[in-house]
Image (spheres, helix red, strand yellow):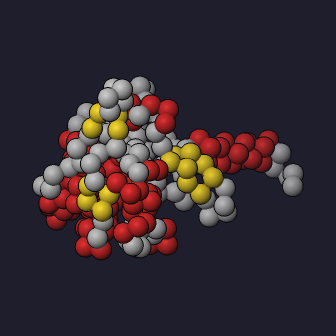
Amino acid sequence: MMDGDRGAAAGLTLTTPQGAGFHFDPGALCLELLTTGGLGPYARYEVLHQPSDLARWLPRSRLRLPADAVRIDPAQLTATRTLRDALWRLAADRAHGRPGTAADYAVLNQAAAHPPIVPRIAPDGTATAPLPADGHQIASTLARDAIALLTGPYADRVRECGAHDCRLIFVDTSRPGRRRWCSMERCGNRHKVQALRARRAEDHPGAE
């Protein structure tokens, strides 16, 4: 589900280690999942500790699903985390021009083999919550979105934030394809401030 499918409503509000909030739109549903944690250095950001954590994440995601519309058991949560970790590696590989591993692609294919969430329409013509779904359907929907991204027209626009200390991944859906930062509110503005200080230091080398 690419960026244009949700318009201005797309994206998440994340919090920096210092406690400041900022808007981050990775441009695809599957990349939103990466903000829930991961392996190695991402483990400290882990938020999917129990099934209810994944259910609470759903209303915040592009899916906009009510938390009580999905039944998730511990095994399904584990499968979703395994999918997320494989996607972290595949997205980072794609961002840096590296080939992904067969094992990680197999994780995506295995998750996508389950039936996805089925969309529904209300009598007034608007989208409505799907019938109660389970964790496998959530993972399948996420995996199918990842496969569509990695095999689609924006596959070569998967990027990692240009800041040296930020690893957030997004798909650049802008027309010129020049997006560098996870968010102008965060890393973009930090870069501007650093560049300004560097120019001032060059102009006034002895100044405090």
Residue 47 position, x and y percent, is 46, 68
Residue shown at 56% from the left, 45% from the top: 23
Q: Is residue 169 visible?
A: no
Residue shown at 43% from the left, 66% from the top: 53
Q: Is residue 73 above or below residue 66?
A: below
Q: Is residue 125 above or below residue 94?
A: above
Q: Quadrant of the N terminus?
A: top left
Q: Which of the 4 image quadrants contains residue 107?
A: bottom left
Q: How many marks?
A: 0
Left or right of 159 in this view: 22: right
Residue shown at 66% from the left, 61% from the top: 19
Residue shown at 52% from the left, 57% from the top: 166
Q: Which of the 4 image quadrants contains residue 36?
A: bottom left
| Residue 86 or residue 8, whichever sits in front | 8
| Residue 181 or residue 112, whichever sits in front | 112
Left or right of 22 in this view: 43: left
Q: Is residue 167 above or below residue 144?
A: below
Which residue appears farthest toward the right when viewing the image?
207
Residue 18 position, x and y percent, is 67, 63
Residue 70 position, x and y percent, is 32, 57
Which residue appears farthest toward the front when viewing the image?
123
Left or right of 164 in this view: 2: left
| Residue 122 or residue 62, whichever sits in front | 122
Q: Quadrant of the C terminus?
A: bottom right
Q: Is residue 200 visible?
A: yes
Residue 78 position, x and y percent, is 29, 71
